[in-house]
Image (spheres, grey):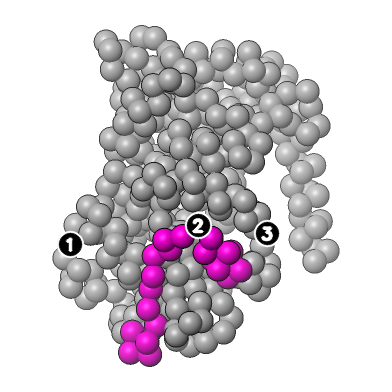
Amino acid sequence: MEIKLFVEKESLFDHYVASHPRGDVLQTTAWGRVKESSGWQAYPLGVMDQGKLAAAALILTKPLPLFPAAAAYSPRGPLYSSPEALAVLLKEGAAFLRGKGGLVWKMDPAIPKGDGEWLEAVRSLNLKPVETGLDFAGVQPRFVMTLDLTRSLDTLLNNMKSKTRYNIRYAMRKGVYIQPLKEKSRLSVFYCLLQETAERDGFSIRPLSYFEAIWDHLVQANLAKVFLAYHGDTPLAGAICFRLGQRTWYVYGASSSEQRNLQASHLMQWEMIKWAKGAGCTVYDFRGVSGDLRPEHPLYGLYRFKEGFGAKLQEYVGELDLPLRRGGYGLWLGGLKVHNWIRSAKKKGR
């Protein structure tokens, strides 16, 4: 087996990612270009076996602020077709990253918890599981909600909670309508809704330029779509979906505090589900929820919203680190503690 850096043959790399059963937009070279717009470097690495790709990982690297080293991350990767190819990818990929000053290689593949082949790889390849809790402390969500789209639209609608169906139909009766965004200049409408949502719910967001990069590299390549919900001329909600192969992901959502009784977000989801099914997708991924399903949990409402559409809970293996330097992983963990403490202090000071 031979490892290669796919710079001039991006189409071969992306075809492997798109056709892999766990392929994700976050492992495409297009996503690498999005991240390069915000200071990362992207390296698509692959393992060739008898002329075919047998494993792949888009690796993002960025210098660390406190150390003369870099962190590496493969969002929803690596992807592989055999344990042997995975072993080669991690061994040679680690050597490649050491040459780039890498301190640790983080990964979080979309592999179901308890997968025996992955558990053996973790044991034999020195991967370190990272405890991220039940909520959203990880980079990518460990707990996601997925909807099977192989059934008819009528069946999908009938399988929803009665309240969800009612809200969808109520929004339609009240004149709410959904429009795909066709012009990049209109991204500012979505972004204003996102800013309002972030202020209301107390989270930080990326600058508008980041979403413009998503438009340039994903929307223009048919890997993403932006939707807006209106009542008359008033925008009430917005969303961005990613799509690759037979899967669609609901990635970003935003809503206005005005006229929330019109249930625009419910109709938005239904229209995006119909769009995904019409595009040939078999899975609609609502993305993250908390793994703590107690009704009194602050994030339980998010779970109930997504469950209302008939989505089912799926738990992945979570984050894992591959240490790249002897003694360096301890520095990495120490730096994370300081970072998390500062972030927690900022939240308390809001």
Residue 195, percent from left and from top = 64, 67
Sequence-wise, which precedes: disc 3 or disc 2? 2
Amino acid carrying label 1: it is: Arg
Q: Label 2 near label 3: C-beta < 8 Å?
A: no
> Which numbered dot is residue 151?
1
Q: Where residue 184 is drawn, which disc sits there?
A: 2
| Extent of the magenta region | 172-194
Category of crowding for the residue at label 3, using alpha-carbon neighbours closer than 10 angstroms: few (below 14), some (14–19), many (at least 20): few
Mark 3: which secondary structure? loop
Q: Residue at x 47, y 56 (%)?
A: 251
Q: Nearer the viewer, mark 1 or mark 2?
A: 2
> What amino acid type is highlighted by mark number 2?
Lys
Please provide percent x and percent y for residue 130. 58, 38
Q: Secondary structure at mark 2?
A: helix
Disc 3/disc 2 C-alpha distance (Å): 23 Å
Q: Tell me what residue is drawn at x 45 percent, y 33 percent.
A: 29
Q: Position of residue 13 (x, y in %)?
A: 37, 26
Whichever of callouts 1 and 2 sits on the residue coming sooner in the sequence is 1
Question: Which residue, as the protein is rendered here, is positioned at the far bottom?
Answer: 174
- Along the viewing direction, whichever of 202 and 253 lies nearer the viewer: 253
> Looking at the rendered structure, which numbered label has been put on residue 163?
none
In the rendered image, the quadrant that contains the N terminus is: top left
Question: Tag 1's secondary structure?
Answer: loop
Q: Residue at label 3?
A: 204
**Residue occupying image coordinates x 60% and y 49%:** 210
Pointers 3 and 1 in contact (C-beta within 8 Å): no
Mark 3 vs mark 1, foreground winner is 3
Mark 1, other Cα within 10 Å: few <14 / some 14–19 / many ≥20? few
Task: Judge whether residue 122 is colored magenta.
Answer: no
Which quadrant does the C terminus fall into?
bottom right
> What x and y, as percent, mark residue 139?
57, 45
Is residue 181 part of the magenta span, yes or no? Answer: yes
